[in-house]
Amino acid sequence: MAKLITKFKYLKPNARTSVGGYAKYIATREGVDKIDKSFKLAPSSLKQQQLIEKILTDFPDSKEMLEYEDYLKEPTVGNASEFIARALEDNSYEVMQTKTYADYIATRPRAQRFGTHGLFTDDGVQIKLNEVSDELNHYGGNVWTVIISLRREDAERLGYNVGERWRDMLRTQTAALAENFKIPMEHLKWYAAFHNESHHPHVHLMVYADEGIKPYLSKRGVMNLRSAFASDIFAQELLCVYEKQTERRDELRSGSREVIAEIVSRINSGIYDNPKLEEMLLQLADRLSKISGKKQYGYLKDDVKAIVNRIVDELAADERIAVLYDLWYEQKEEILLTYTQELPPRIPLVDNPEFKTVKNAVIQEAINILADRFPMDEPEEQSASDPEPSDEETEPPLTDKEKKSVMWNLYHQAKELLDSESEDYDPDAAVDLLIDSAHLGCDAAKYRLGKMFLRGEDVTKNIDYALVWLEDAVSNGNQYAEYLLGKTLLQETDVEQDLPRAEELLKRSSDKGNRYAKYMLGKAYLDGILLLQNIPEAIRLLTESADKHFAPAQYILGKLLYRREIIPQDLERAVGYLERAAAQDNPYAAYLAGKILLTEDAVKDVLRAIRNFEIAAKNGNDFAEYQLGKLYLYGKETECDYTKAMFYLSAAAEHGNRYAEQLLHSIKSGGNWSAALASIRLLHHLGRMIQNRLEDERRGKGIAIDRKLKRKIDEKKQAHGLRQG
């Protein structure tokens, strides 16, 4: 038996049983949990107003209370009650001696008492049962009813043994109700009541719309709502479900995340030698060359669609993809079992609507072959490192008098002893000197000690001792200590995460002009994962950090200005920031600058692109080496140079670049280079797509930054031959 039982039906207008009567029944019958608090939204009563006037006369300082401020803004029953209760509590001794107040205390509704019925709906909507019943009796459309039921033991364990929990759950499902009943959100109406039955606690839900709007619920809509309810109610248990491993997964590696990572890693590594797939891609390219109009799957003739489908089948037949697809299905079926015992039959990947976008990706790769176009292959995600301030940067400029002071002499002596290439290298003696300098008030010494013991640099790692010195430097307003401690607390590096304190410290450091803090805080606001997302503030901080010549900030800002997903595209500014970072040997920035200069007509400059690729290649970027190899091999954008091509492609392959390996293999075997590269790109794309679906299900709705939206953007880009991530 499934854990969650649902029943969907609808009541027709003018039926023998009144719809309004049904609403009254579910709202008032024995066993209903009377959780309605909407009466609190009504205007304050005359008796309340009179009592408040007396309180203000007897206790004038009550006007300073926040509850009174709330009451003045919204003089409702609820706010009046809150003010009266607090005022009487604060003046309890005098109150107990006064009969007027004593009578009120004896008779007024307690805060924990609910209303006279159990009907509830969206937050902030007052419910008057008679009015709801009358409206339903005169409603001309169908009213859908849903019953959602749990076993008693499940309700007790999950906290769904009280009406408030069901109310809060259904309020989070408002958008899902509107979407699946095909009702615009602004026209949706719903009411529900919780019945705390002894064996099967359940909720009755009524859904309808404004007059003129006809709700409709399909079989798919029923499944969607069952899934949404189950995902919400069993959220914590589903997290455990996602982590459960089958025996076959354990053989690959313990933990589903590791299994998926292992499979994707195998998909993304090595050669993909599939002449059959390459031949089909060439065949598809030939057919597309004879077709006018839109070259998208939905617009193609059946015989061309059949070629696309065979290509997807061939990709799905790869053992690694097949295992990944099985994992996706196993996880999906475990979720389905929470609300149904009948699992739908598994369907081939090519027929699965969840993965339909791969078909347009196949078509785009064939078009690339047809147009003799070679997309820029690059990693799914590139991230810049977060370098620490140099020791010299953390020291304030000194006056001649300060240079002669004892504490600075001790500090500089310690620095000399920390030079690992010096014959005088002696970290123990250096620590002693730094401690002496710190005791004399040198904040740079305190910061240096904190950093050394936090990182385990030249000394044995000691987190507690490091925090003592960092906190001491922070108390004196040292911006570098504020940055390092804030970053440590933000990233949960060796210490318990403390996001409010981390944000405060990074703000303090940033306000003092610290470019590292500006970058770290800006990046956190941009991601919206650890801190609340704030795009305008993120852009401001990253711009200030970039303008202070900080290469990682210049790279991120250049990337944002290029991608146009968050801020408007500005290719000139994007290249400007990226080339400034490239001049500081940032390989990611150099590669992206090269890509823009090579592919964007508005700023196209092949020689500058090659110079940037060379900077990136010199600093270890294998995709820059691969790109240079392709440029010199194809000779489309620059003079063909086979020797240089082989040099760069071999270097990229030695550094683990899978596309370079594939291209070299194709060259040696005499195959079609374009078709071979298209094949491996499609394999990687499909593997990444299934991995994203697995991660989406694992996270559940509402967790993390809009990964589903990002996934859709990635797939749209892939279908148009653009970079993802």
Image: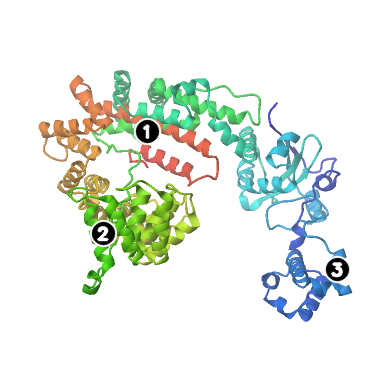
The answer for how far apart the CA atoms under marks 1 and 2 are is 39 Å
Give SS at disc 1: helix
Amino acid found under the numbered disc labelled 1? Ala
Q: Is residue 639 above or below residue 21?
A: above
Q: In which quarter of the image is residue 79?
A: bottom right
Residue 241's spot in the image, x, y percent?
57, 31
Residue ID for mark 2: 549
Q: Residue lying furthest top in this view?
A: 276
Q: Can residue 542 be seen in this view?
A: no
Answer with left or right where residue 623 lies relative to residue 144.
left
Image quarter where the N terminus lies is: top right
The answer for how far apart the CA atoms under marks 3 and 2 are is 68 Å
Residue 442's spot in the image, x, y percent?
32, 65
Can you tell which of label 1 and label 2 is closer to the viewer?
A: 2
The answer for how far apart the CA atoms under marks 3 and 1 are is 72 Å
Residue 327's spot in the image, x, y percent?
49, 26
Q: Residue at x 27, y 37 (%)?
A: 375
Q: Residue at x 61, y 24 (%)?
A: 343
Q: In this view, does 415 lie above or below 475?
A: above
Estimate how packed mark 2 is, as few (under 14), some (14 to 19) or many (20 or more) residues with alpha carbons within 10 Å. Answer: some
Can you tell which of label 3 and label 1 is closer to the viewer?
A: 3
Give SS at disc 3: helix
Amino acid found under the numbered disc labelled 2? His
Amino acid found under the numbered disc labelled 3? Tyr
- Indicate which disc, 1 or 2, sits on the residue closer to the N terminus: 1
- Indicate which disc, 3 or 2, sits on the residue closer to the N terminus: 3
Give SS at disc 2: loop
- Give the label on residue 104, or none: 3
Estimate how packed mark 3 is, as few (under 14), some (14 to 19) or many (20 or more) residues with alpha carbons within 10 Å. Answer: some
Residue ID for mark 1: 361
Answer with left or right where residue 84 lies relative to residue 630.
right
